[in-house]
Amino acid sequence: MATNLFRFIIAAMLVGIVFGAVINSTLPIESATTIAGYLGVITDIFLRLIKMLIAPLVLTTLTVGIANMGDSKTLGRVGFRTISWFLAASLIALSLGLIMVNLLQPGAGFALEVQENGAVTSQANAFTLSVFITHLVPQSVFEALADNEILQIVVFSVFAGTALGALGSKVSRFTELLEQGALVVLRMTGYIMLLAPFAVFAAVGSIIATRGIGILITYGTFVGGFYFSLLLLWILLASVGRLVIGKRVYSLLTAIREPVTLAFSTASSEAAYPKLLEKLERFGVSNRIASFVLPLGYSFNLDGSMMYCTFATLFIAQVYGIELSGLQQISMLLLLMVTSKGMAGVPRASLVVIAATLSFLGLPEEGLLLILAVDHFLDMGRSATNVLGNSIATAVIAKWEDQLRDPALEPPTIEKALEPREIKPKIGTPGKATA
């Protein structure tokens, strides 16, 4: 079933490209925009259905994962290793983006002049470190659940899971109830995923219908350079994963191809979260590690988005012919190490972070408008990269904690629970009724 769904998603993406190109080339822009609007309804419904599940899924799986972690020493060790990996991956992604944009110089051919434009000033002021830190703590868990505030749900789940772990057997029934809730949400995910090919067709078709394939040619150097840089990041992350988990990293890449493709085609890493959790457990990552590391990764380990921040910021500087010194670029990197951690759960958050970085460096804020035209195409790549980075991070932490099992020998908990059970009749003695 999983293989068929993957094929349907790929086919839907290709059909969407052809359909969008035909609409864009044969109909006037007003008609194409109208059709794109109808297609957008399909995509919006699918994404809303997925987002409907994310908050309860993160709350239940992360809380249960921490509760089952054991003593506080184990929790602290896993947390330290997880955050250390995230910081190292963030530094690698930001640095690679910085190096590649300086080597490729994708903005050198534009040669635009600075104009007075305050269109994005409000966006630049929308994100500050103090606001981010304060926003981490929820005023109400119910408000956080209603607003799908992943970071706030993570904070609450950490406290709740730690409390459940400390109380132990006294609250075992409540812990089991949460685990059963996670199983229900995962089964709902399976139903919703049947709509994925339709959503992929609508998402790709609508953007091509309005923008046209030609826009990729206009921004060819920028888009091509960024995707080439993402490819290098994929190779680097996979190589590091190979050092830790060995040849099984290739099996991991095969296992996550469906959620990666879904994230790419819908330009939303959130859309892939429920399916990714299921795939990682099927791969052999223990439930308690996957349910702990993955939600944190979605909050603090967005490798593709972080690379985009450095790449796009220096692209804008190159477009306007502004040279940044090495010290300025290092300062930008350090700033993004902090500000990029607030991107989770914020639509088009990369643009907000880039706007804040432009303001910090004194670059023309109207440069943000240049990348808006192709941001959706770039968001597809960075969303898929976010999924890949978090998958490798989860598998690596599981390996370090000796929680990476061989699925052929020991099927993962959630997958086994989701599989239909075969009820075998009891065999009694001939001539006697079986109780």
Image (tube, rainbow, N blue to C red):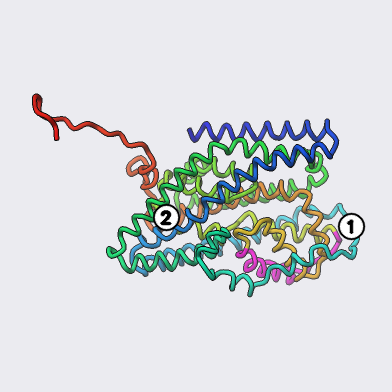
Circle 2: residue type:
Ala
Q: Residue at x 68, y 41 (%)?
A: 203
Left or right for 171, reference 140: left
Q: Considering the numbered disc 1 on the image, is that residue within a helix, a strand or a loop? A: loop
Q: Nearer the viewer, residue 88 or 272?
A: 272
Residue 341 image-quadrant placement = bottom right
The picture places residue 105, in percent across and down from the top left corner, at 79, 55
Label disc, if present, on residue 221 of the rendered structure: none
The picture places residue 132, in percent across and down from the top left corner, at 62, 70
Q: Nearer the viewer, residue 402 or 141?
A: 141
Q: Is residue 242 visible?
A: yes
Label 2 vs 1, first from the N-terminus: 1
Q: Nearer the viewer, residue 279 or 176?
A: 176
Q: Which residue is mark 2?
A: 398
Circle 1: residue type:
Leu
Q: Residue at x 80, y 70 (%)?
A: 362
The picture places residue 147, in percent across and down from the top left corner, at 58, 60
Q: Where does the magenta region start and end?
A: 320-342
Q: Is residue 351 above or below residue 242?
A: below
